[in-house]
Image (tube, grey):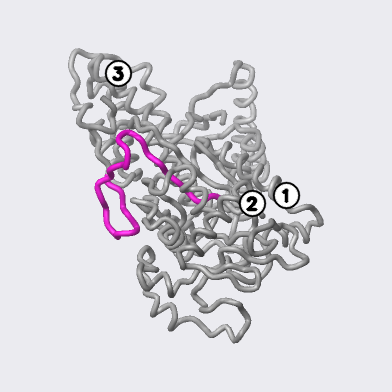
Amino acid sequence: MQLYQSNPIKIYNSLTGKKEAFKPINEGYIGMYVCGPTVYSNVHLGNVRTFMSFDMVFRYLKHLGYKVRYVRNITDAGHLENDADVGEDKITKKARLEQIEPMEVVQRYTVDFHNILNTLNFLPPSIEPTATGHIIEQIELISKIIENGFAYEINGSVYFDVHKFNETHEYGKLSKRKLEDLIHNTRTLDGQSDKKNPQDFALWKKAEPQHIMRWPSPWSDGFPGWHLECTAMSTKYLGEQFDIHGGGMDLKFPHHECEIAQNEAAKGKSPVNYWMHANMLELNGKRMSKTTGNTINPDELLSGNNTIFSKAYSPSVIRFFNAQSSYRSILDLTDDGLLASEKGFYRLMDAVNLLEDLKESTISSIDVSAWRQKCYDAMNDDFNSPILIAHLFEAAKYINQIKEGSETISSEDLKLLKETINAFVYDVLGLKNTAKIDSGTDKLSGAVDVLIKLRQEARINKNFALSDKIRDELAAVGIQLKDGKDGTTFSVN
């Protein structure tokens, strides 16, 4: 019997606006699609938060015994600035500014994306398709939408007819927007576009002479619209209807709304049963924005090479910080928040490290099975990782009490406790035990102890510049100092 059979899940479905009992289309199998990055710049920390949330979802579903096909795309064909139907292609613009080929831009930032996710201990998706690798499928999809009467071609470009679609379908049902309101709030185009209506969106754009990325089609040499690629790739690898579609809250409209419309126009059915949206990441209480400078790249946070945070933070601390908030809540990235998460992370890991040395008794003073079920209940409730972490801290307190002799645990319950903690800490949350010293030799430990003593002397002499330099230089090579009431200890990341 698989764990999923005794652990029914509820998922907050953005389409219905409520938590629903999750039932996969095929028993024991799950198809999940998450919108990936447009690779024209370094991956944004806000994007990383979204991908990290769905990495945790993926991990938990696998832990329950589901066979999960997780598809996360790479947008390498470029789409227009502001995701509109006019303007300059983002990848082409970057290539022009750096005087390199567009696919050099794609390669550079795809590698960066993978490096960051590998550093943060992500599981790779089952399939990672690219937009440029599926131009044929996108052209076929456009042809089907035209054939069904929901798109029109003009001057080599093809547009989705939102008004025609809305006569027999409901455009806006995901984002809870009415077409009448969209019409009222849209300015007249004054002849600046070939579209019949401002609400229509591009399925295929005719390429201007200077546009580098172009492909032949029945309508023109051009390139596909941004919304189209996800419809084509998700249904190719997961079927015309699949279980879960995820992405950031900012993609709900228009991107995901257009995905639904395209699929219904081409195939006559809604593509997804459960829509999941991760909320925004803020920086010091304000929206992250490159234009205002209120932004930081993941590698800057990991290395400490920035002017915003007091120190570098390990990948596991960043993951732990992310998991302490629901994926549907706005998360504010602050130095105080990260410092608190770091302390909590090490407190949890210190307890985990005690597990191997706990003394067994004939009976347990705490119901480990009931505690274990509370961990599952938390994750079964729309992947409620903050509540899971609260239960893990309950276990940490219990472990310390056993070590002190005020609580007891039986051999059988100790085995269950170890299995459960390992499952949730490592397999589900994706943390690594960087609190456990793995120096390889006693010489490293001795050398670091010398530096710790030098740092303590510097602090006594109020030479804080030297004290901070020792701490920061050690952190840069993966050695994290921890100041506590009993002195300073270290861990190797």
Task: Please provide the residue range marked out in magenta.
Answer: 10-36
- Which residue in the protein does label 2 denote? 76
Q: Disc 1, disc 2: CB below 8 Å?
A: yes
Left or right of 374 in this view: 482: right
Question: Residue 187, image x and y in percent?
Answer: 52, 84
Q: Which residue lies furthest to the front in this view?
A: 147
| Snapshot quadrant of residue 365 | top left
What is the distance, in whole Å, between disc 1 and disc 2 at their CAs? 8 Å
Q: Which mark is residue 276?
A: none
Q: Which mark is residue 415?
A: 3
- As helix, strand or loop, the secondary structure at mark 3 comes to helix
Work out whether mark 1 precedes mark 2 in sequence or the reverse, and give the earlier one: 2
Count all numbered tags in the image, as a single digit.
3
Viewer-closest of 20 and 489: 20
Q: Residue 103 carries which label?
A: 1
Position of residue 284 relative to residue 272, above or below, is: below
Does 25 lie within the magenta span? yes
Q: How crowded is mark 1: few (under 14 residues within 10 Å), some or many (20 or more)?
A: some
